[in-house]
Amino acid sequence: MTDLQLGSLIVGGVIVAAVYAFNWWQEYRYRQQAAKAFARNESDALLDVPKNMVRSAGASRMEPSLETAELVPERFEPLLVEPELEVAPAYQPQPQTAPVREPYIEPPVAPSVAVDAAPYVPEPVKVAAPVSDDSEALASSLLDSSIDFVAEVHATEVIAAADLPVFRGSKRVQVMGSQNNRWEACLPSSRSRYKELKIGLQLADRQGALSSEQLNAFCMSVQQFADEHEAVVTFPQRSAKLTAATNLDEFCASVDVLIGLNVMAASRPFPMERVRLLAENAGLVRSPEGAFHYRSDSGKTLFTLSNYDQTPLGNTSSGLTLLFDVPRVAGGVSVFDYFAEFAQHLSVALSGELVDDNSKPLTEASLDNIRKQLGVLYAKMDDRGIAPGSVAALRLFA
């Protein structure tokens, strides 16, 4: 082996050793850095989340109580207040619950007997509907795309109002026809004839939201009618409307509240003749079915007075119930104030006790808290564009 070869081997060995030593040193240094980094007490991003950062899943609905002023109430079935369509002003109010009341027929009361009833004549609340000759506005309130599924029918030949069938629909169906460029409600007794029709099915009511099956049956009914008259029919997107129906029903459920104030006899039953005089002095009128109604100037029921146990009013009563159907009443806060004032006067005049449906005594503070809850509910309705007591409210809460 020559000196050159030997030198080359030595130099190559030194280079290999240097590279190996360098790599070992780099590995050792990185290992030390990693050990120092993981030795610190770092928090776990998944396990160590503070409790106040975790969203709690609360119930979607809650009944209003006297202790809280911002609760979402349960829905109630309609009662004692017949559905009416009338435009009414908006206002601002909130509540407590009452059991579902069934309407009843009351037998006639015996002839009047002189009874010493303390006169009760507070200034009555006047809630009158605005007067308007705008037929287009009335037509739009009877059929509203925000609360109705509206099918449009375009015919080549005129269709008489008398030839319109009863369209299948588990909820309210409204038919509007265009005549002389004006929309009007189609009545079977009318002699009007139309080339353009709007047929609407309401998306929700107190029985719940419109279902897919109900909507399909309605669309088939309208399509069959259009085919028979060689007309063209257009429908809104069904899936979007079904989603809108669910959302509308959830909103209605959150504001659908019935306030019940009960006046219970302490020892002896209340003489009904005295109750009648007190009610009439306060402006209530007895209806054919037996209950006493306090009405607006336009004839709309604002609140009712009936027997607590839902039996027909006889000669005496062991308890009375005043009912206030929140979303159906225009002038809500002022009407509630009169409603509460009359209930308090009734309990004093009859020597009874004013309680809620859990037999809990109602004080001024309790009534004031209910009033605050009314404000929350009415604000939600106003934000949604559904004024309490309006045509839309009467349709949705029927």
Image (cartoon, rainbow, N blue to C red):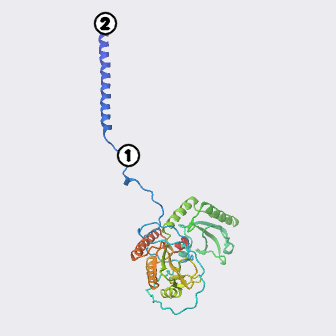
Label of residue 2 in the image: 2
Residue 35 seen anywhere in this rendered image of the structure? yes
The residue drawn where x is 51% and y is 62% is 247
Side of 374 relative to 226 (left or right): left
Toward the viewer: 307 or 72?
307
Q: Is residue 141 above or below residue 245?
A: below
| Residue that extends furthest to the front in the rendered view of this protein | 267
Q: Quadrant of the N terminus?
A: top left
Amino acid type, label 1: Ala
Q: Earlier in the sequence, mark 2 or mark 1?
A: 2
| Crowd rating for badge 1 (residues with CA inside 10 Å; few <14, some 14–19, many 20+) | few
Q: Looking at the picture, does residue 288 appear above or below residue 66? A: below
Q: Position of residue 380 (x, y in %)?
A: 45, 68
The quadrant of the image that shows the C terminus is bottom right
**Secondary structure under badge 1?**
loop
Toward the viewer: 201 or 47?
47
Residue drawn at the location 33% of the way across and 43% of the way down: 42
The disc label shown at residue 45, or none: 1
Mark 2: which amino acid? Thr
Query: Toward the viewer: 28 or 144?
Result: 28
- Which structural element holds mark 2? loop
In this view of the protein, which residue sits in the foreground, 309 or 300? 309
Q: Is residue 302 visible?
A: no
